[in-house]
Image (spheres, grey):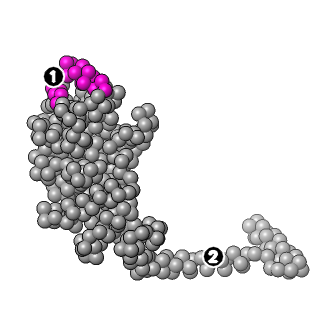
Amino acid sequence: MPTADLTVLIPNHNHARYLPRSLGAVFSQSVQPREVVVIDDASTDDSLAVLESFAQRHPTMRIVRNERNLGVVGTLNRGVGLTQGRHLLAGGADDYVLPGFFEKAMTLLDRHPSAGLCFANDAFQIGNDGAIQPNAGVWPERPDFYDADGVCRHMRNTIPGHATIFRTAVLREAGGYDADLAWYSDWFVNLTVAFRHGACHIPEPLAIRVLLDENYSAAAKPGARHIAVLKAFFHRVSTPEHADVAPYFRRCGAAVAFGTDLIRAAAARPDLWQPHILGFLNGFNRWDYRGLLDDPDPVVREVAAFFLGPFWQREEEEFRVAIEKPLRNELEHVKRHLPPPGLARKMSWLAGLALRKVRYSVAKR
């Protein structure tokens, strides 16, 4: 069976029941990876027994064990430092790949050697036995390479990490996964790499993320911790090290998907009203902004009022002008075809209508 210079990295913590599916899908690929590295993050279930069973049958698999729990991001970064392949897929013990993913991704990366990564369409299932639901986005329907401008133009919210293969050196140069960004660490590094080096896209679902209550990303809920992570995002994207990609982060508008906690996080910055911060906050709809008019933070209220000012006023005026004339014309048309008031006038109107129908029928003959 053909192999690729690819490492599949899988962090695991107490996911013994999902490992047979995720590992089985990897070892069933038409092109096999150079190595499969599973880092067990101090599991207390039967994970090690499951992993050892697979390792006995697949000599390319390595098991690494954390002596203490490092968490998802810490475990991923340890794995990035240990892997040997020129390319890297950072998977999940509860996610799984579909047939043909490695072959198609490696073919496209070979065709476009400057690309920093290759990804397939997002697809997910809710619960371990849920139906697969595609989430394709707005990418063109043919495999291709996209530079930073193309990524901005076609990307909706993110590049799906579970369906992404990196060039390992590029991922390391980008700093790996930022622990301060928690659940958004993969989002940030995926886009950083794509903006710097371009990205290949395969327009089909080739990996499935499984949405479970215990998912690490399930903790990304509105509140103080969420705001703290988004503050860290603003800090990172404002550093000189990310000056090359910051304009693309603003332009693509992907951060708006994190909700209005993004505004709450920005409100704490002294440079809030500067374009490099304010540019992240103008993609919400009017109802989002209106919902912040009662926020306890007066700065948040001020931001909401600002965006509800000339921005939405202008949009509402353009909308009114665009629909007012057609609606007025339609109303006049309806009025002309309604019967007049009063019984006598209605009878006369009906008689005229009947006469016109008779004349039309005769004329058709």
Amino acid bearing label 1: Pro
- Per the image, the residue denoted by label 2 is 330
Rendering coords of residue 10 (x, y %): 23, 35
Q: Secondary structure at mark 1?
A: loop
Residue 33 in view here = no
Rendering coords of residue 3 (x, y %): 15, 30
Residue in front for this viewpoint, 354 or 151: 151
The numbered mark, 1 or 2, whose residue comes first in the sequence reads 1
Q: From the viewer's perspective, is residue 184 above or below residue 362?
A: above
Residue in front for this viewpoint, 44 or 53: 44
Q: Is residue 113 left or right of residue 300?
A: left
The part of the image, by quadrant, that contains residue 280 is bottom left
Residue in front for this viewpoint, 56 or 133: 56
Q: From the viewer's perspective, is residue 49 above or below residue 136?
A: above
- Per the image, the residue denoted by label 1 is 59
Amino acid bearing label 2: Glu
Q: Is residue 277 left or right of residue 171?
A: right
Residue 158 in view here = yes
**Residue range (magenta):** 45-64
Residue drawn 19% across the image and 66% down it = 238
